[in-house]
């Protein structure tokens, strides 16, 4: 009986989690005129990839001629591909910077003792607790004075500032689980501290590095507040900004919006699938200890 109840609860949870995603994919394969039929079609009667083709190529398919379009195509939805490119470039840059600098900083704090260590460490962690909205205006002014408004560089700088404290703390805890005797043995054999870090510690910490990279990537990819404040044109606008602009357009093509949403979740899903084993081992390692 308990097994049946557990299976039923699992199925309900699965439906709750996957239901909206399946409905989203199903809706993206329909045109507007089919989306507004009553009762709605949970399974498309005339499935089509024209919505995706329109967003990717920006060339209206034949099915979008005349009154078949249903509603006017949303210019915001058609801007998704440039936004995806911006988000991908920014997120990858933030991820790489986080992995490199948080590794160096975390290892330094985990293994070395130096003057001001505790104070600077407390300052770094405390800075992560500051609400982003409370520093939005000062950051906007600073970015404006630097001449970086409406650039991907501005987003990279801001996202690194907000993600680096957590990844540094996470990796510091992760490095603390490794016995220092291994590193000491390598240094006795003539390895430098940096050589020991790159050749011994980093390979052992691969799951933790993957988990930190995932946090930096996802935090940057889904960030909206500074993406809205610091961007003006499609030269730097990111996916969350474009999707929100699509959502508040009262004359939006819902079919295109659904297709844009599906395309926007593909990069993080692929990232999670590729690195899922490392990410799970990394977070599990810290939580288990």
Image: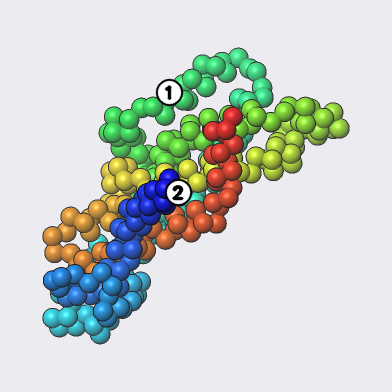
Q: Nearer the viewer, residue 16 or 76?
A: 16
Q: Nearer the viewer, residue 75 or 61?
A: 61
Instruction: Tell me the distance, in whole angstroms, between the alpha carbons under discs 2 and 1.
Output: 46 Å
Decide if residue 71 is in sight here: no
Q: Where does label 1 land, which residue?
A: 126
Q: Earlier in the sequence, mark 2 or mark 1?
A: 2
Q: Residue at x 28, y 33 (%)?
A: 133
Residue 198 rendering spot, x and y as whole percentages: 70, 40
Q: Residue at x 17, y 75 (%)?
A: 33
Q: Residues within 10 Å of mark 2 (few under 14, many from 20)?
A: few
| Label annotation for residue 3 | 2
Q: For residue 143, which quarter of the picture?
A: top left
Residue 212 rendering spot, x and y as whole percentages: 53, 41
Decide if residue 109 is in sight here: yes
Which structural element holds mark 1?
helix
Q: For residue 248, which quarter of the picture?
A: bottom left
Residue 210 rendering spot, x and y as whole percentages: 57, 45
Asked if residue 116 lies left or right of residue 123, the reply is right
């Amino acid at each position: 009986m308990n097994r049946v109840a557990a299976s039923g609860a699992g199925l309900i949870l699965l439906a709750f989690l996957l239901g909206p995603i399946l409905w989203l994919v199903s809706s993206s394969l329909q045109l507007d005129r089919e989306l507004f039929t009553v009762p709605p079609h949970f399974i498309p009667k005339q499935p089509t990839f024209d919505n995706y083709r329109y967003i990717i190529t920006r060339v209206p398919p034949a099915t979008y001629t005349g009154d078949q379009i249903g509603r006017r195509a949303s210019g915001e939805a058609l801007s998704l591909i440039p936004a995806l490119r911006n988000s991908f470039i920014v997120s990858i840059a933030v991820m790489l910077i986080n992995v490199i600098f948080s590794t160096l900083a975390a290892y330094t704090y985990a293994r070395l003792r130096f003057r001001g260590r505790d104070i600077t460490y407390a300052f770094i962690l405390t800075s992560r607790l500051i609400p982003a909205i409370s520093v939005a205006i000062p950051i906007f002014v600073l970015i404006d004075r630097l001449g970086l408004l409406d650039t991907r560089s501005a987003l990279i700088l801001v996202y690194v500032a907000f993600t680096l404290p957590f990844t540094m703390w996470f990796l510091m805890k992760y490095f603390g689980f490794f016995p220092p005797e291994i590193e000491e043995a390598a240094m006795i054999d003539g390895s430098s501290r940096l050589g020991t870090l790159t050749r011994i510690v980093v390979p052992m910490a691969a799951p933790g590095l993957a988990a930190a990279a995932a946090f930096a990537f996802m935090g940057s990819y889904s960030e909206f507040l500074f993406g809205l404040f610091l961007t003006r044109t499609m030269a730097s606008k990111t996916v969350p900004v474009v999707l929100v602009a699509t959502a508040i357009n009262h004359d939006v093509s819902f079919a295109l919006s659904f297709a844009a949403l599906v395309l926007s979740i593909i990069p993080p899903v692929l990232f999670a699938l590729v690195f899922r084993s490392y990410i799970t081992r990394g977070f599990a390692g810290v939580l288990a200890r």
